[in-house]
Amino acid sequence: MFEITAGGYYVSHFVGRSKERLTAHYELELSTFSDAQSAFDDRLYKRIEGSVFLARPNQRRHTIGNYEGYFFYFDCDDPAFVARYLDPLPNQIYNVDTYRFIQHMKDVIYLYRNRQAHADGAYQMYLDARVTTILLELYHTAQNQIGSPESSKHAANISAACQYIREHFREPIGMEEISRAAMLSHSFTYNMFKQFTGQTPHEFLTGARIRYACEQLIYTSKSIGEICLACGFTNPNYLYYIFPKYTNMTPGEYRRFYQKK
């Protein structure tokens, strides 16, 4: 179903405008750092950190400025899937769960780089599953974001709010700080945030803290109480309560399982 033709992590050092080129494949990129703009045909997009770009075959592209990100190029031989899920996608999708999307991208890039060692039917099935997961998540995210002119208009605001949470989740932040980052009112930020992400700002904040807790449990010897406070939770015992709701394991079980693995 899918064939990956290139993949990796790209760092641009080009300050001015790159030479315009014509795409030969679908090109999927996750922007992780940017001070740049990308053009698709005649439209220019700001490369917001945490957003995803999808170029289609035979699109004209060029970039202005520096950027970094994960990428892979691919072809799809299923016309029905292309028509149903790829054709409706815009060139830019404001991806809000960057941590999870990075894992998706790493999986596909790993498969591409190790394709010769795993050239069998199981490899292709796993590759198809990973790419399909990525595209379906993008499709549903895009449907929320382009559902109305109002939501499309404020996509950058909510992306800024998500980025603020990712950078400051260890601090005691609430709706006042989040809405200030979005440059919108409290109630409007809350409604738009839930429409874009499927989560409330508090749920998104808790998810960011839980992901950090997972990393700390695996890669450090800190106590669970210390990790809880380092995540931004004020009650040292709160992690025992909330962690199983996200991982189906207690913090101690999670640490033992993944450190052993």
Image (tube, rainbow, N blue to C red):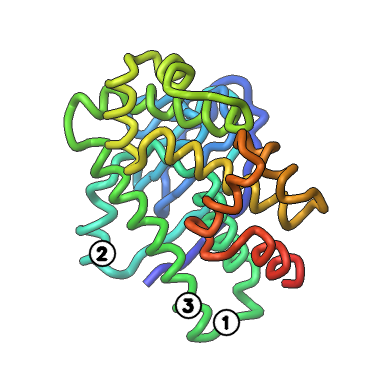
Residue at point 62%, 64% (across, down): 110
Dot 2: element: helix
Q: Which residue is mark 1?
A: 119
Question: What's the residue at 46%, 65% (across, down)?
Answer: 130
Which type of secondary structure does the marked residue at label 3 adopt? helix
Q: Is residue 245 visible?
A: yes
Residue 231 position within the rendered picture, expressed as x and y whole percent measured from the top left: 64, 39
Q: Residue at x 60, y 73 (%)?
A: 115
Decide which of 184, 252 is in the foreground and name it.
Answer: 252
Determine the residue located farthest toward the bottom in the rendered image.
121
Q: Nearer the viewer, residue 82 or 133?
A: 133
The answer to whether residue 67 shows anywhere in this view is no
Image quadrant holding the C terminus, namely: bottom right
Of mark 3 and mark 1, the one earlier in the sequence is 1
62 relative position to 67: left or right? left
Q: How far across and down, in percent of the image, does residue 122 sit?
A: 50, 83
> Which one is nearer the viewer's eye here, 112 or 93?
93
Q: Is residue 72 left or right of residue 26?
A: right
